[in-house]
Image: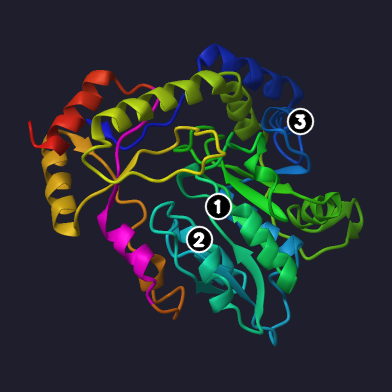
Amino acid sequence: MIPVTKPYLPAREKLDKYIDGIYEREWLTNNGPLVQELTKRLEEYLGVENLLLVSNGTLALQIAYRALGVSTTNRDEKPEAITTPFSFVATASSLKWEGVEPVFADIDPDTWCLDPKNIEKAITPETKAIVPVHVFGNACEVEAIDEIAKKYNFKVIYDAAHAFGVNYKGESLLRHGDAATLSFHATKLFHTIEGGAIVFKRKEDLETAKKMMSFGITGPDAIEELGINAKMNEFQAAMGLSILEDIEAIITTRREIKKLYSAKLADIFKLQKNSLFITDNGAYVPVVLDNEKELLRLIDKLNGKGVYPRRYFYPSLSRVDLITSSPIQENAEDIASRILCLPIYSYLKERDIDLIVEVLKGND
């Protein structure tokens, strides 16, 4: 079977080295030494400051909204945030969970990221933030979004779940916005089994978030914030540290796999148009078919060969009534109905890629 992805598992000797230390110290959570070490090493590797590790990527978004004052405990307020309907459900559902109404604006039909030209049309008196997504690791138009945010005094929280290790114009893409959030779920190219992180622009926001993610407790007898439990534990950090030792090889391998796919399929299917200024991390291999009927036919053929791609992101979130009453966004709806993410993971063999390509070309 060839699934859409497989979690990367480091050598047991690497992981065991960290786990042995956990057993010796008997310190399992509450900002343990491995969490502290992973925080420092990720800041160094990614080229960022003010990084906060949390227990998953959804809580990373929720803590960011709270720390930046987007969500509120005031039931009389009805804040809104402009975001994209072409994303994983957590981008929008995390807003809804925090009492913030997601208002969708359409995507660029080629980059698949939130189109800045559509943002201002979605602004209302209740708008407090913009939540764009670096879709499949592709950079949003960060300068244009920043200009809009400054003009209207909005916060910008980037969902950068796919953008681990991506640089934009020579520096980390995660440095843009008031905050950028990462997912370290097992399916990501860098993972901590479950986990996530927030990169804040300002240290004072980091300090606020630190209080919020540990019940608001600031000392043995002090509670200064309304908080929640979003702490990463030592076993998660051990996995992250083990994988971080291999991360260059992981990204290099995935880039090579993506290049192989692109060379074989670029003349047949529409591919994502990447920013000219980014480094590709090889996170995903999405292709767009001519129509949904053709997509469903090819999924059936691939499944028959033991290959299981995924429809990322389907349905378009503007179709999910639980989340929003925003109107359907045409570009997002169109791409969501025709897009297919092909298998990619570090252990994928070239013969498997050839099999997939032959099915897609109709030569199987």
Marks 2 and 1, the one that precedes in the sequence: 2
Based on the displayed image, in which of its 4 quarters is residue 41 positioned? top right
Q: Alpha-carbon distance for marks 3 and 1?
A: 27 Å
Residue drawn at x 63%, y 21% as measured from the top left? 19
Crowdedness of circle 2 by 10 Å Cα count: few (<14), some, many (20+)?
many
Based on the displayed image, in which of its 4 quarters is residue 147 positioned? bottom right
Q: Alpha-carbon distance for marks 2 and 1?
A: 7 Å
Marks 3 and 1, the one that precedes in the sequence: 3
- Percent of width and height locating residue 240: 60, 29
State the quadrant of the C terminus: top left
SS at badge 2: loop
Three-letter residue code for mark 3: Lys
Residue drawn at x 69%, y 58% as measured from the top left? 64
Do we see residue 62 in this rendering?
A: no
Pick whichever, 291 or 319, lies toward us: 291
Three-letter residue code for mark 2: Leu
Crowdedness of circle 1 by 10 Å Cα count: few (<14), some, many (20+)?
many
**In contact (CB < 8 Å): disc 2 and disc 1:** yes
- Percent of width and height locating residue 255: 43, 27
Residue that carries the numbered disc 1 in the rendered image:
140
Magenta region: which residues? 328-346
Pick whichever, 155 or 230, lies toward us: 155
